[in-house]
Amino acid sequence: MNVASANRIEKIQDVLRSLRAVSPDIVGSAMVSTDGFIIASLLPAEVDEELVSGMAAALLGVGERIAGELMGGSMEQTYVRGRLGYVILHAVGQEALLIVLTTPDAKLGLVFLDVRRRVQELAKIL
Amino acid sequence: MGLIQEVARTNRPILGNDIPILVFRVFRHFSASYVEEVLGRGAAVVFQNGGRDLGREAGTMLYKPDPTEYLREVCQFVRDSRIGILEPREVSDTRLVVDLDECITCAGMHSIGKRICQFEVGFVAGVAEILIKKKPKAYETKCNANGESTCQVTVELA
């Protein structure tokens, strides 16, 4: 990996760290490319990152398709509510997406706001 | 038991084990077409990762510590399985480029204006992963279905 790439990944990692620091409801995050590769990650250690990045890219695709088919528009965000919390996927430009994990009682409005802000920062870094 | 060994068990005493390539292709292209309709651009990841799993499993079975010998084994396997004729075009520390002539998925098809062999891309990437012991990026740099004369996979090794 060259120095420029390493610097970029470090910057992305910083954004992910700041996202986690801003809200105790955010328990993990990762940025993955739309072709299913992890770019940077602060996901819990037990998570299979390769599998998750593939699933996230597929889910992004489903989100885009369903937004297009049902609403005739483009997708901005997809989220999944589980018993143990939320998984939020947010597109970062055309090439990447941000995955955010939250606690089950997260204040989603605030989380979405923080996510949107960080997405803008990440898009600039990319 | 790996998936290859699992699906290798057959019981077709009347119909036998060989099928025309057309049958393989309609199964492959109809499923790919629907998956693409549902997953959009996410479909490519699904097919490529499926191919990676197969490449890793095949690569583990064929593994030789010497990279040249390993690559030769893989090429022979691909040929014996009639997946295609795999020809290394560039092998370096940073890149592996292979042509896949007579590709099982698309050789001879009319051009549809796009590259479609994501599964084969994943297969080559999975085979390479066994050698370099990390997940490499890979992409299709030529495809019969795109009007090019062969299928070609480029793997970034570093």
Image: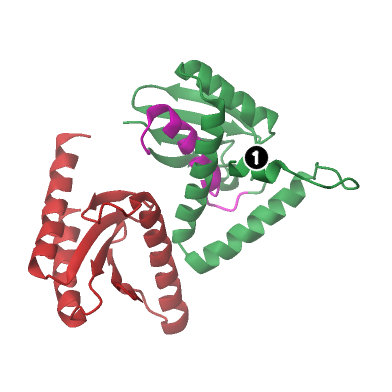
Chain colours: A red, B green
Q: Secondary structure at mark 1?
A: helix
Residue B129 magenta-highlighted:
yes
Residue A89, above or below B128: below
Residue B19 in percent (x, y) is at 80, 45
Lateral position of residue A102 relative to residue B59, left or right = left
Instruction: Look at 76% across and 51% down and name the residue there.
Output: B23
Q: Within the image, what quadrant is residue A104 found in?
A: bottom left
* Quarter of the picture holding the C terminus of chain B: top left
User: Which of B90 and A81 lies nearest the eye of the viewer?
Assistant: A81
Task: Give the vertical position of A99 relative to B54 (above or below).
Answer: below
- Point 65% across, 60% down: residue: B30
* Residue sitting farthest toward the right: B14
Task: Tell me where residue A30 appears, x and y as whole percent.
Answer: 25, 57
Residue beneath the point at 44% across and 60% down: B42
Range of magenta residues: B111-135
In percent of the image, x 39 and y 59: which residue is there?
A57
Residue A68 placement (x, y as % from top left): 43, 76
> Residue A110 falls in which quadrant of the image?
bottom left
Q: Identify the residue position indicated by label 1 in the image.
A: B5
Question: Does residue B2 appear in this view?
Answer: yes
Mark 1 neighbour class, 10 Å CA radius: few under 14, some 14 to 19, many 20 or more: few
Q: Is residue B152 magenta?
A: no
